[in-house]
Image (spheres, rainbow, N blue to C red):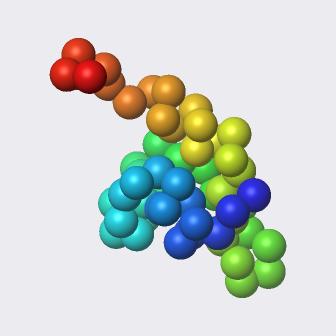
Amino acid sequence: MVGIAEAARIMGIGRSKLYTEISEARLKVRKAGKRTLIAVADIEAWCRDLPNTGDV
């Protein structure tokens, strides 16, 4: 489990985009007290689901 800032860093996106992904239910979060946490497995699943543009 990682916090918001670490999740954004791992995913290579900004915090605003991360919150958009959360609000549009493309990424699950869990609460531990006041902390918002994201499972690394959910981050990996989000990355796998990104469209492949073929530009690699």
Residue at the image position 40 percent from the left and 69 percent from the top: 15
Q: On the image, which quarter does residue 51 sit in? A: top left
Q: Position of residue 39 (x, y in %)?
A: 71, 50
- Residue 54 relative to residue 45: left or right: left
Can residue 41 be seen?
yes
Residue at the image position 61 percent from the left and 50 percent from the top: 28
Residue at the image position 42 percent from the left and 64 percent from the top: 19
Which of 49 and 29 lies nearest the eye of the viewer?
Answer: 49
- Which quarter of the image is occupied by the N terminus? bottom right
Q: Position of residue 48 (x, y in %)?
A: 50, 27
Where 54 falls versus 12 (above or below)?
above
Which of 46 and 26 lies nearest the eye of the viewer?
Answer: 46
Q: Position of residue 52 (x, y in %)?
A: 31, 20
Can residue 23 be seen?
no
- Residue 32 relative to residue 34: left or right: right
Where 41 falls versus 39 (above or below)?
above
- Residue 5 relative to residue 15: left or right: right
Q: Position of residue 9 (x, y in %)?
A: 48, 62
Where 10 falls versus 33 (above or below)?
above
- Which quarter of the image is occupied by the C terminus? top left
Q: Residue furthest front?
A: 56
Q: Residue furthest bottom?
A: 34
Tell me how many marks there are.
Answer: 0
Q: On the image, which quarter does residue 17 sit in? A: bottom left
Q: Residue furthest top?
A: 54
Residue at the image position 37 percent from the left and 57 percent from the top: 13
